[in-house]
Image (spheres, rainbow, N blue to C red):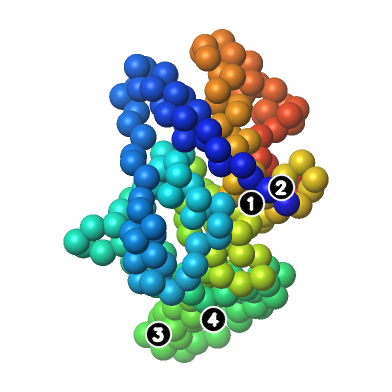
Amino acid sequence: MQTVNWSGVRERTIALYARQSRQAGVVLPPVLSEAQVRRAEEQFGVVFPDDYRQYLLRVSAGGRVRTLRVDGRGRRWDGDQPADRANLHVPFPDHDTALAASEDHWLTEPQEEHYVSAAAYQADHDAWRETADAAEDARTFGTIPLCDDGCGFYTRLVVSGPMRGAMWFDGRATCDRLNPLLNDDGQPATFGEWYLDWLTREEALTTPELRRAASARWHAGTDVPIWMRWFTS
């Protein structure tokens, strides 16, 4: 893990958004105060990893990530669900153990041909499905879905447990992937590494031609940015 120097990052981010706003009307949300961040942490029962905390205090409450709202309605992220916030204090489970438990449960799915009554089958299957969904949900306890990447994909920040501070890719909606996003050293990237890698690359993409060329390289597997290393671990 690299130590992130946040000095100048807000100015760089403002300059990037100023350039992009001329094209798409993008506005960078303001920063949060220390008191606002602490109220959010108290509500969720966690202390945010320092990189993300510094981002909220020194760069923005949103921007590249979902905006953290702190107002009279409480604390929440744009586009999230109450269930996303309810278990942030629960430690993010060991990936292999949680995956094995989920897979084992799927092997116990009731089979209709084993039932005489359709009603009995449906009741058992409904109960089994509820338990299966709960086991799958538990695989991402202790994480914030910071980015909606489309197609049901999310980028998550671990805020509780041994993996606290790491960025993970959640592609279970379509490809059954849940894995850490790796930095250049092959280790799970921190929020700061993930964000500064994105920022540095975005700053260089000043024309549509440069963006298309970069996208082609990345999809070919060359110099892939951290945020796009979905299938490298």
Residue 175 percent across, percent down from the top left: 60, 51
Whether residue 169 can be seen here: no
Identify the residue shown where x is 67% and y is 29%: 219
Residue visible at 61% across and 64% down in the picture: 164
| Residue identifier under label 3 | 123
From the viewer's perspective, tell me whether residue 209 is left or right of residue 181.
left
The label on residue 190 is 1
Amino acid type, label 3: Ala
Q: Which amino acid type is marked by label 1?
A: Thr
Q: Residues within 10 Å of mark 3 (few under 14, many from 20)?
A: few
Seen in the image, is 223 located left or right of residue 24?
right
For label 1, the SS is loop
Kind of residue at disc 4: Pro
Residue 2 is tagged as: 2
Give the secondary structure at mark 4: loop
Q: Residue furthest right?
A: 185
